[in-house]
Each structure stands twice: as C-alpha cells, then as structure tokens.
Amino acid sequence: MFLRDVVGLQPATFEEVTSAFGALRTNSMAFGGGCLNASAVYPILSLASHACVPNLEPMRQIGLRFGFTAQRDIQKGESLTISYLASTWEHRIVTRETLRQKWLFNCECDFCRDQTEFGTFLSCPLCASFGGTCPGWMVSKEPLQADADWQCLECGETKTVQDIMVIEESARSIAERDQTPEETRLIQLRALVHPSHHEIVKLKLRIILSATGKTPEAIGKVFSYCQDILTLQDKMAVGTSKLSQRVMRHLVHAKLCVLQERQRKGLMTKEDILGELSRCNILSQHP
Ligand SMILES: [Zn+2]
Ligand SMILES: [Zn+2]
C-alpha cells in the first residue's frame, strides 16, 4: 500500500511488493548512524555467505559504500564469509535458532560443526555429575542437531538440551546481577560453566573496556582478562579483528601502568622498562 500509493510504484503487484520486502528483510545490510538509520540490498555483498566465525569483518563505513577487512589469512579458493549476527558471544543453540528464524537456514559452518567450538567451549556448561564432583565439560553429541543430547567429555554422562538451557538461563541470570560485584559474578559463573563461556567473556570484556581502576590489583586483572580474550580470539583465528586490536590496546596500557608504577617506586629504570617491553614482544604476537 505504501509503495503503491505513497512512493508511486504502480502498478506493483502484491507478489512484487512481498518479494521486495522479503529481499530487504533477509538480504539487506543496515547502514547510516546518527539521524540516518536505514538498510539497503547491495547486489554483490548480499551474495556473501554467513559464517559464525567469518573471515571478513566490516570496516568503518564511508558514505553508502561498504568495505571489509580480512580477520585472518584467506586461502586461494576459500569462500569469503561475513557474520549476519550482531555478536559472536552467544550460546550456539540461541545463535543457530536466530539464523533459522530470521534467515531461514540451518548454519553448518565449521564453527557450528565443531563440538568444542574451535576449542573455545563458548557454550559449554560444567558436567558436575556425581554430586557435583565431575569437572568435565558438556558438549553437544550432534552439534548440527538442535535437539541432540549433550555429553560430558570426562565421564560420558548425558543431559538433554532442555537441561543445558536451564543451566544457560542460570548463567545469564548471574551475569545480569548488576548489584553483585563483577568479580563475584565471575566466580559464580566459573562454578557453572567453562571459563571461556560466552557470559564470562562478555563480563570480562565489560571489565576491560570500562576499566577505570588504577590500583595494581585492578590493572593486573585487566591485563589477565586481556590475555584471556586474545587467547580466545587466536583459537578462533580472528587475531587481527577490530576487537583483538582494541583489547590489545588495553593490554599494552595495563602493562605500561604496571611498569610505570615499578619505576615510580624506584624498582625499575626507564631502560629496564624498554627492555621489558621488547621482551614482551606483545605487538609482534598480535599485530
Ligand atoms: Zn555457524
Ligand atoms: Zn562428567
């Protein structure tokens, strides 16, 4: 009605309008910012396939054009992929359901196929069978089957996907307890899920990116969490992503704070600091 009567696209049939709406809903990219918030179908970009850990990520947008950078080396003949999702840090079952509902496909990317999600265990709860004593991690027996049971890698005990989602809900509830100190929430989460579970990652990122504490303890935690995130990014082979670079800046800043504090106390000279930084070799590990 709007396209025919207001925009003047007459005579547009009902099928043409619904087809255009469908293309816009499933193939469009959002662009703009500020007072402009729109989406458009880009003829080439719309052909790009989704991968939960893609090899391309969007660059800062210039005008109405899109550009992408490689998150890792791309082999000749390898498909160029982008992520249709707003965030990587979500449970696999939730992510795959979002893709199914909004883009109407079952994702079968390498990350979805891998029981351990490239060794990150982003979605994995602690087994805790035998009175809470089993320290194993639960993984899906069939990662591409939404209703498949999950099994402990240590003791072999199984849980239904409903059991897994109950644990997931508990983890989400702990992560969202804003009145509880972040460090306490991290301890509570570690008793329930893998140390690299996505709720723990999101909490650590929040601590890193909003870090204002100047105490050695606060700086030490930021340093440690930055290393955790970068290790995770390396496992996912996205070491050159924008997130990795951002975390790297915080890591270097935390390291400098620690070294400057030692210099202030007379424990290090400027030359010692430069030597320490060159030994760290941080930037060459994570360009
Ligand atoms: Zn996937
Ligand atoms: Zn177990």
Image (spheres, rainbow, N blue to C red):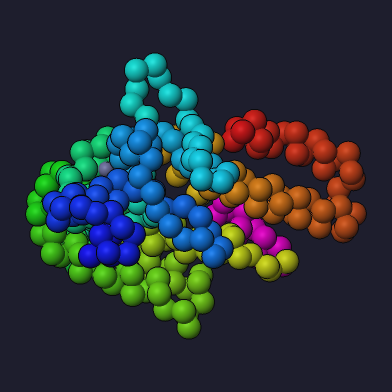
Instruction: Give the farthest residue toward the bottom.
Output: 179
Nearer to us in this view, 49 or 224 = 49
Residue 48, position as x, y percentages in the image: 33, 35
Quadrant assignment for the N terminus? bottom left
Nearer to us in this view, 108 or 2 = 2
Residue 118, position as x, y percentages in the image: 33, 39
Residue at 68% over, 68% down: 213
Residue at 13% over, 64% down: 162
User: What is the number of callouts on the image?
Assistant: 0
Quadrant assignment for the C terminus? top right
Instruction: Identify the magenta region.
Output: 215-226
Q: Main SS of the magenta segment?
A: helix
Residue 182, position as x, y percentages in the image: 50, 72
Q: Is residue 2 magenta?
A: no
Task: Please say whether residue 126 is visible from this viewpoint.
Answer: no
Task: Please say whether residue 178 is visible from this viewpoint.
Answer: yes
Q: Is residue 91 left or right of residue 229?
A: left
Residue 271 to residue 163: above or below: above
Q: Quadrant of residue 97?
A: bottom left
Residue 60 to residue 182: above or below: above
Nearer to us in this view, 235 or 100 = 100
Q: Is residue 129 left or right of residue 210?
A: left
Q: Is residue 221 left or right of residue 41?
A: right
Instruction: Give the farthest residue toward the top.
Output: 76
Nearer to us in this view, 256 or 217 = 256
Residue 28 to residue 201: above or below: above
Q: Is residue 167 left or right of residue 252?
A: left
Q: Is residue 225 magenta?
A: yes
Residue at 66% over, 48% down: 249
Residue at 38% over, 40% down: 42
